[in-house]
């Protein structure tokens, strides 16, 4: 019975993550192990004993401190050995005044971490009791496990603290980087506007007077400016998403996908695209941000099926997986599977701009939004066999 109680306490202690939890386990277990009338859990605090916790028929000394040299728990710690006292008033190590207001007649005290004690566990009896070797051994086993648990709790607290510090550092670095990206892209605007304005003025002023080559060079400058302007726009949009606040709610993601495809059709009414939508799809996330995800994924599917006939796009949810995995699938140009991971970095493209226009910022945006939700995005494809993009909107279960 006592052995089973000890095993239960050892198991509980192995899971304890804080001193408070350990205290709670030990004060009950110590008393139940021997059937004593009271138990206390004492911690060494410099040159003092701190009576941290107790479980007893009447109050003992919870919350009080005594010099190591003036109490029996101190004696146990200083001598690194258990004390068994059948009659406390006959023992000179006991400060009798402190015991007179209590019920205690007999006690056992064992050190926590015998080699270099950090505390002690006491058992007390209201009627004379000479604790046997087996009782002392049980208590000492509990004390030994307690020592390990306390060391683990300290390690755990240190680790947690380190994780907290690293997270803060990372967040600060991230915020700084984003602020930097934002202000750089923002500041690039002004000189670009000057190039734009003056090259346009030059084009107008010199219209018809430039030799063939010069006219072509001027046009190349104008194209470069337009392209750079679009890239800066993309960068600004990307950094705005990282800064945006998230508002989670349940919303009809299928309906959103249908709206996105309707807008694509409106922009290119000449395209014949067969869009299949799984009915009744719901999702939990920020609908504004998820709309951007769908605009990019469905926009890509739309774009990369330009040469497929008939072009097919599907949006649905994978059956039987939690958290929900959504999928955008097309039967378009596809890409080599080995590049599937790279696409999510900004400005990474696998197709030439002549074939399929774009700047390569769409999937980077998708990934940012998905990660902001705690989710994951990945792709599967084969050249000329279409592509499938999958995403979740919450962390793995
Ligand atoms: N459905 C798809 N089928 C085939 N290739 C794709 C598909 N989606 C993305 N890709 C590949 O991944 C690259 C990156 O996609 P991303 O959406 O980031 O950029 P983009 O579409 O080229 O430009 P942007 O989205 O900025 O207009 C694409 O250039 C293309 O090579
Ligand atoms: Mg895109």
Image: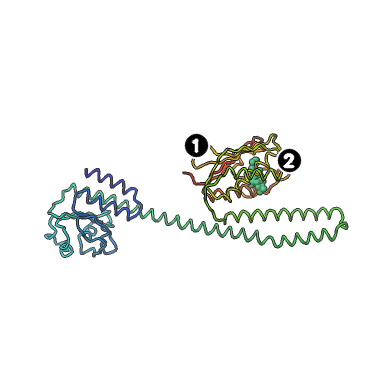
Image position, residue 254 (x, y; %): 58, 42
Q: Is label 1 or label 2 in front?
A: 2
The spot of residue 252 in percent (x, y) is 56, 44
Taking 312 as reference, is 99 above or below it?
Answer: below
Which residue is located at x 19 percent, y 58 percent?
Answer: 58
Above or below, 266 against 193 in this view is above
Write down the residue under mark 2. Answer: 270
Q: Residues within 10 Å of mark 1 (few under 14, many from 20)?
A: few
The disc placed on residue 89 is none
The image's mark for residue 320 is: 1
Assign the N terminus to one quadrant of the image: top left
Colouring mode (rainbow / by chain / secondary structure / one colour): rainbow
Is residue 349 visible to the viewer in this orientation of the structure?
no
Seen in the image, is 344 located left or right of residue 268?
left
- Of residue 201 and residue 262, the one placed in the foreground of this image is 262
Residue that appears at 71% across and 62% down: 191
Dot 2, how many residues are within 10 Å of its Cα: few (below 14), some (14-19), or many (20+)?
A: few
Instruction: Please name the residue shown 22% across and 57% down the image.
Output: 76
Horizontal and vertical percent for residue 352?
A: 70, 44
Q: Secondary structure at mark 1?
A: loop
Q: Is residue 103 visible?
A: yes
Q: Quadrant of residue 18?
A: bottom left
Residue at left offset 70%, top offset 56%: 229
What is the C-alpha distance between the residues marked 1 and 2?
Answer: 38 Å
| Nearest to the observer: residue 272 or residue 123 | 272
Residue 250 appears left or right of 157: right
Locate residue 180: give its quadrant: bottom right
């Amino acid at each position: 019975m006592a052995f089973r109680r000890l095993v239960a306490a050892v198991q509980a202690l192995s899971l304890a993550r804080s001193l408070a939890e350990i205290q709670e386990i030990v004060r009950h277990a110590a008393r139940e192990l021997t059937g004593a009338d009271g138990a206390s859990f004492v911690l060494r605090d410099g040159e003092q004993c701190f009576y941290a916790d107790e479980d007893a028929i009447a109050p003992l000394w919870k919350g009080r401190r005594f010099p190591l040299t003036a109490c029996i728990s101190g004696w146990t710690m200083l001598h690194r050995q258990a004390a068994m006292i059948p009659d406390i008033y006959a023992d000179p190590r006991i400060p009798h005044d402190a015991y007179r207001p209590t019920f205690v007649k007999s006690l056992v005290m064992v050190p926590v971490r015998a080699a270099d004690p950090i505390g002690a566990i006491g058992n007390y009896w209201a009627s004379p009791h000479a604790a046997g070797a087996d009782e002392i051994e049980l208590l000492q086993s509990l004390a030994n496990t307690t020592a390990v648990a306390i060391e683990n709790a300290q390690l755990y607290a240190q680790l947690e603290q380190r994780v907290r510090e690293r997270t803060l550092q990372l967040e600060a670095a991230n915020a700084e980087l984003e602020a930097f990206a934002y202000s750089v892209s923002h500041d690039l605007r002004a000189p670009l506007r000057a190039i734009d304005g003056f090259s346009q003025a030059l084009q107008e002023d010199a219209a018809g007077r430039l030799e063939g080559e010069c006219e072509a060079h001027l046009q190349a400058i104008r194209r470069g400016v337009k392209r750079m302007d679009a890239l800066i726009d993309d960068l600004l949009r990307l950094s705005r998403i990282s800064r945006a606040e998230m508002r989670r709610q349940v919303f009809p993601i299928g309906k959103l996908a249908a709206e996105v495809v309707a807008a694509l059709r409106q922009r290119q009414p000449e395209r014949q695209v067969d869009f299949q939508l799984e009915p009744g799809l719901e999702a939990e996330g920020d609908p504004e941000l998820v709309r951007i995800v769908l605009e990019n994924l469905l926009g890509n599917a739309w774009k990369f099926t330009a040469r497929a006939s008939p072009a097919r796009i599907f949006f649905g949810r994978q059956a039987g997986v939690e958290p929900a995995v959504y999928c955008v699938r097309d039967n378009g140009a596809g890409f080599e599977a080995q590049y599937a991971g790279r696409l999510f970095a900004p400005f990474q493209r696998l197709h030439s701009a002549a074939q399929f226009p774009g700047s390569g910022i769409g999937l980077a945006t998708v990934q940012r939004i998905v990660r902001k939700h705690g989710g994951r995005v990945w792709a599967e494809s084969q050249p000329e066999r279409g592509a499938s993009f999958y995403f979740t909107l919450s962390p793995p279960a």
